[in-house]
Image (cartoon, grey):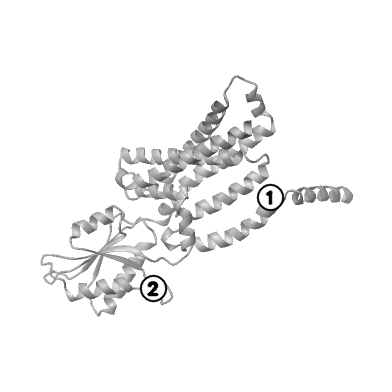
Amino acid sequence: MIRGAIAIFKRDFKKFLGNPFVLIFTLLMPIMYLVIFGNAMGGTITHVPIAVVQEGPPFTETPLYRSSVVDLGHFQQAKDQGRLFDVTVYTDEGAAKKALAGGQVTGVVVFPSEISSDHAVRLYVDSSDYMTPSLVEAGVQAVLSKSGARNPVAVNKIYGDIKYIQFFGVGVIVMAIFMTTMMGGGIALIKDREMGIHEGYLVTPVKRSSIIFGMISSGTVRAFLAGLIIFVVGVLITGVIIRSLWDIFLVLVVIFIASLGVTSLMVSIASRFSNQQEYASITAFFNLILFMTSGAFYPVRGMPDWLRWITVINPEYYSVDALRSIILRGQGLDVVAFDLVALLVFSIAAITLGITTYRRTLE
């Protein structure tokens, strides 16, 4: 019995050591979790864009307004940290609120005029960002306290009280798309190749391009259905209210484009591997980097600069940002257009890469 167990142990251990790719990624993953997860979560949020405006009429700048604009521009949470706010001065309250609704700023501070009835400082914040509103309110309170002002601060959360489960729930939709593509698409593709099914395709009249488009289409539909199901379940669990049928349509468009791009990327990656273990190792690595830097867990503004650069080429970041704008803020095509264009560019590049790499595999 013991000799048999030892023999099986030797075989399995040699098999593990005989695959250096899997061995390297097995050791690399915990290190990457430490580096990526440790830096992506709990970082210091700085350079929050806010607007400040003097209430009118009259539009004469008050001493409180002038001193607070300067102090907000230099406010730091700690001496060794960067400034908390990037301040933009507006002369019109309506324009400042429009910038807040459009996502250009995350807060608007309205200072009272000399004839204000209650002399309250009005603060309007983008409450869809779970972490930032409390920092903005604390910063404004600190600046007022420093100047000796006793004005009350009236906080207005323009999107209501957003819970963390609602903030995070949007990211789960993108996670479902990636996991479905990785597990159901890439691994199934490698398994078909191991069983010789692809060689079977080549002896039929079906063109190589038809095989590639068929596989990408199938994976896209599976990922889209997974994203749609998680979207519906997420709405029921988190209690998010979808404001209109147009918002639902935009959500479906984002899910479809993201599914198409991620599926094409996974096909291109899977076409380079003939071993399921190696493919699972590399996709787990991609999942870690892409999801952690997507902003699903924590605002991207709180990440170090080198991680923020990854978000520039991260399709999951644009997917999360677009879905959060539509689902939590009720924003329209004018706001999410940039995210959609970025996703389309990624999808076209991924489709081209997927077709090229998979065609080489078939040849």
Q: Percent from the top left, x then y, of residue 347?
A: 46, 40
Asked whether residue 299 appears in the rendered view, the answer is no
- Asked if residue 293 is positioned above or below residue 134 in the image, the reply reads above
Instruction: Judge depth for marks 2 and 1 and give the one in front.
Output: 1
Which callout, 2 or 1, points at the residue further toward the start of the chain?
A: 1
> Can residue 310 be seen at all in this image of the molecule?
yes
Q: Quadrant of residue 156?
A: bottom left
**Dot 1: what SS?**
helix
Question: Could you say whether the residue bearing mark 2 is in a helix, strand or loop?
Answer: loop
Q: Quadrant of residue 111?
A: bottom left
Determine which residue is flagged by label 1: 22
Local crowd at mark 2 within 10 Å, few (<14), some, or many (≥20)?
A: some
How many labels were placed on the picture?
A: 2
Given the image, on which type of amino acid does mark 1 rest? Val
**Residue 85, which numbered label?**
none
Q: Which quadrant, please, contains the C terminus?
A: top right
Residue ID at (16%, 73%):
62
Note whether 298 is above or below 328 in the view shown.
below
Eyeballing the image, is 341 above or below 298? above
Q: CA distance from mark 2 to mark 1?
A: 44 Å
Q: Is residue 149 above or below residue 5?
A: below
Q: Nearest the camera: 72 or 153? A: 72
x, y percent for residue 273? 65, 41
| Kind of residue at badge 2 | Gln
- Residue at the top extreme? 205
Q: Which mark, residue 77?
A: 2
Q: Nearer the viewer, residue 124 or 309?
A: 309
Q: Is residue 275 left or right of residue 182?
A: right
Residue positioned 63% across, 31% down in the render: 362
Q: Position of residue 98 (x, y in %)?
A: 24, 54
